Image (cartoon, rainbow, N blue to C red):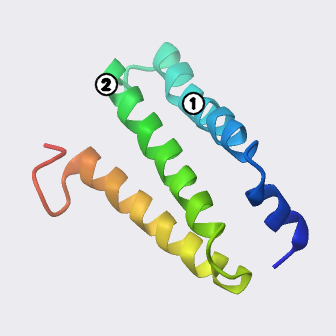
Amino acid sequence: MNATIRNFIARNSVFAWIALGTGLVLLVPLVAMRFTDAVAWSAMDFVVMGALLAGMASLFVLVARKVPGRLLLPIGGLFLLGFLYLWAELAVGIFTGLGS
């Protein structure tokens, strides 16, 4: 694994970047709500999505600090799949009634 990526993950400033990235991603639906009625998020939607984004990214960083570099890509893929599953489950309830 690239030493630059390993050094970035090892620094605690990575959590500030996660917070910044989470805020920027949450700006997308916030701005979209100003221009269309198709996006109608409540304050709780923003809180849940923010916690999901920041939580998954932070958990990935903590796990990435413990595993060898060659496993980062597969583990990152698993975290991405887990994030997408939780997002879809909360949005529409694929296997449970959480989203409905």
Residue type at numbered disc 1: Val
Residue 14 pos. (x, y %): 72, 46
Q: Is residue 96 left or right of residue 56?
A: left
Q: Quadrant of the C terminus?
A: top left
Task: Determine whether the residue tagged by mark 2 lies in a helix, strand or loop.
Answer: helix
Classed neighbour count for the residue bearing mark 2: other residues with Cα under 10 Å, few (<14), some (14–19), many (≥20)? few
Circle 2 residue: 44
Q: Is residue 32 left or right of residue 14?
A: left
Residue 74 position within the rendered picture, expressed as x and y whole percent measured from the top left: 58, 81
| Residue type, numbered disc 2 | Met
- Residue 11 coordinates in the image, percent (x, y): 78, 51
Dot in front, 1 or 2: 2
| Image position of 18 with respect to 77: above or below | above
Cα distance, mark 1 to mark 2?
16 Å
Q: Residue at x 36, y 51 (%)?
A: 87
> Residue farthest to the left?
97
Which residue sits at x=42%, y=45%? 52
Asked if residue 42 shows in the view, the reply is no
In this rendering, the count of numbered labels is 2
Callout 1: SS: helix
Q: Which mark is residue 70?
A: none
Query: Which corner quadrant of the image does residue 43 belong to?
Result: top left
Q: Nearer the viewer, residue 37 or 3?
A: 3
Is the residue marked by circle 1 packed among few (<14), some (14-19), or many (20+) residues within 10 Å? few
Q: Residue at x 15, y 47 (%)?
A: 98
**Residue lying furthest bottom in this view?**
70
Q: Is residue 79 visible?
A: yes
Q: Position of residue 76 (x, y in %)?
A: 58, 70
Residue assigned mark 1: 28
Identified at 10% across, 51% down, the residue is 97
